[in-house]
């Protein structure tokens, strides 16, 4: 990283601030001393122009449609590797050797069980509780069961906590699903890979043998890779902000899950699928397209465009291929929902209105269709997102904890409330 300097003109003062240049991306003006030198703050709702941290994990170029994990393009990782390899890369910074990969897979696999007393937690939730509500509670409660990995000053404990959460999140998500549909919990098996284990825990029942479909397992593994990390998004920033207080790692990840639950963030694929259900049939599409183009109509097509990507979402290219592989494997050809999705995809890729605005189908559009075809209800979509994103949260949390320049997060504000005034006794009001 190199640095130059830039000047700010505020009133009649000219103040110099360093400009930092990273490996990739635009230069960053370091305004850490802005208030001390000028007595002013910046105002940046949504942090659209603010870098809150320095990171070596993930890089996004939204204009060019680029997503890199530790320098590796997301499409190469999804096409040639598996999810646990991506996890190792995000955590340690390099792709593993054969021996390192085998050791990492072994450690993750042998941490998939949860403490048996956690089973009692589920009976405290209503049967119709949203799986994300269950996950927020259960992941936060992990700190009550694993006291030996909550000391964030101990590198060994940090790593143990990291491995535990990556390993146990699929088990907790599957238990939330099973509880919701009234079926008994299915315990993990050590001879299955990460995605296959999760499919079995979700869809197996004790009364018959369950055979994992390798096409579906590979598709789910790709979905996990594509959602593993996405730079400083809302949930990741939440994890970092919670972690900056010194909170234990389980609490920080629970905070990330809570943020991910929002429909504008992790709930987008669930909302997208519900939109397809609302449209219903292909003949109704023109009406909804007209509504989407009407600036006075609040209706928006979900699953198209992205806040960061102003070009095609690089994850969507892989997800498009994966989606059609799953549909072909399952022989789904006459699904009205699929017909609607395919026609919407065609329109978005060719209609001048969408092309000009670069409202291309994003990863949520394809992942929602794929997960539904695999048998997951819409309420589980965000939970699967949380399973995938856990490693990204953990890697970002770990990087923040180990950063010597890390400070407790404390955003400023532009106050527009009442000015100072005197208290009046209630008898005189």
Image (cartoon, grey):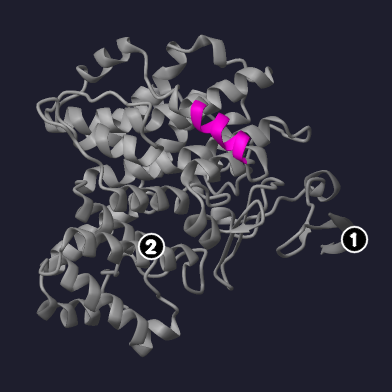
Instruction: Describe the element under mark 2 as helix, strand or loop.
Output: helix
Name the front one of labels 2 and 1: 2
Q: In x, y percent, where is residue 13?
A: 89, 60
Is residue 211 depicted above or below 423 in this figure? Answer: below
Instruction: Name the residue nearer the viewer: 171 or 219.
Output: 219
Q: Quadrant of the N terminus?
A: bottom right
User: Left or right: where does residue 278 sit relative to residue 326?
Assistant: left
Instruction: Describe the element under mark 1 as helix, strand or loop.
Output: strand
Query: Do we see residue 296 in this rendering?
Result: no
Q: In x, y percent, where is residue 267?
A: 33, 50
| Range covered by the magenta-colored residues | 98-106
What's the residue at 49%, 66% (across, down)? 314
Examine the image and state in which quarter residue 168 appears: top left
Is residue 27 depicted above or below 175 in this figure? Answer: below
Q: Are marks 2 and 1 in contact (CB under 8 Å)?
A: no
Q: In x, y percent, where is residue 355?
A: 41, 84
User: Left or right: where does residue 336 sit relative to residue 347?
Assistant: left
Residue 273 counted in the magenta span: no
Instruction: Name the residue nearer the viewer: 222 or 46.
Output: 222
Q: Which mark is residue 319?
A: 2
What's the residue at 10%, 73% (across, down)? 281
Magenta-drawn stretch, dominant element (helix, strand or loop):
helix
Residue of label 1: 4
């Amino acid at each position: 990283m190199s640095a130059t300097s830039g000047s700010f003109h505020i009133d009649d003062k000219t103040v110099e601030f360093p400009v930092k240049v990273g490996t990739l991306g635009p230069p960053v003006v370091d305004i850490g001393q802005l208030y001390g030198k000028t007595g002013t703050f910046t105002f940046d709702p949504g942090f659209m122009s603010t870098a809150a941290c320095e990171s070596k994990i993930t890089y996004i170029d939204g204009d060019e449609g680029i997503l890199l994990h530790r320098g590796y393009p997301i499409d190469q990782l999804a096409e040639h590797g598996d999810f646990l390899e991506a996890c190792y890369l995000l955590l340690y910074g390099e792709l593993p050797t054969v021996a390192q990969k085998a050791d990492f897979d072994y450690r993750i696999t042998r941490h998939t069980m949860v403490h048996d007393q956690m089973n009692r937690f589920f009976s405290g939730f209503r049967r119709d509780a949203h799986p994300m509500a269950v996950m927020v509670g259960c992941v936060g409660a992990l700190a009550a069961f694993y006291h030996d990995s909550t000391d964030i000053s101990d590198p060994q404990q940090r790593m143990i906590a990291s491995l535990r959460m990556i390993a146990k999140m699929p088990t907790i998500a599957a238990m939330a699903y099973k509880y919701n549909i009234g079926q008994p919990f299915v315990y993990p098996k050590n001879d299955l890979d990460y995605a296959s284990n999760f499919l079995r825990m979700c869809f197996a029942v004790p009364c018959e043998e369950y055979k994992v479909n390798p096409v579906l397992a590979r598709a789910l593994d790709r979905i996990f890779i594509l959602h593993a990390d996405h730079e400083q998004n809302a949930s990741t920033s939440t994890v970092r902000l919670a972690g900056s207080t010194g909170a234990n790692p389980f609490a920080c990840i629970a905070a990330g899950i809570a943020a991910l639950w929002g429909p504008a963030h992790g709930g987008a694929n669930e909302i997208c699928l519900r939109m397809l259900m609302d449209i219903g049939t292909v003949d109704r599409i023109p009406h909804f397209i007209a509504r989407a183009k009407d600036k006075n109509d609040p209706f928006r097509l979900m699953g198209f465009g992205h806040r960061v990507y102003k070009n095609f979402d690089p994850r969507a290219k892989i997800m498009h291929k994966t989606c059609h592989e799953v549909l072909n494997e399952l022989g789904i050809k006459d699904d009205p929902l699929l017909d609607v999705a395919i026609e919407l995809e065609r329109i978005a890729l060719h209609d001048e209105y969408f092309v000009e605005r670069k409202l291309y189908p994003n990863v949520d559009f394809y992942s929602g269709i794929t997960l539904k075809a695999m048998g997951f209800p819409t309420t589980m979509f965000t939970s699967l997102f949380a399973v995938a994103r856990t490693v990204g949260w953990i890697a970002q949390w770990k990087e923040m904890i180990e950063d010597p320049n890390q400070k407790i997060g404390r955003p400023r504000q532009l106050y527009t409330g009442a000015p100072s005034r005197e208290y009046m006794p209630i008898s005189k009001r």
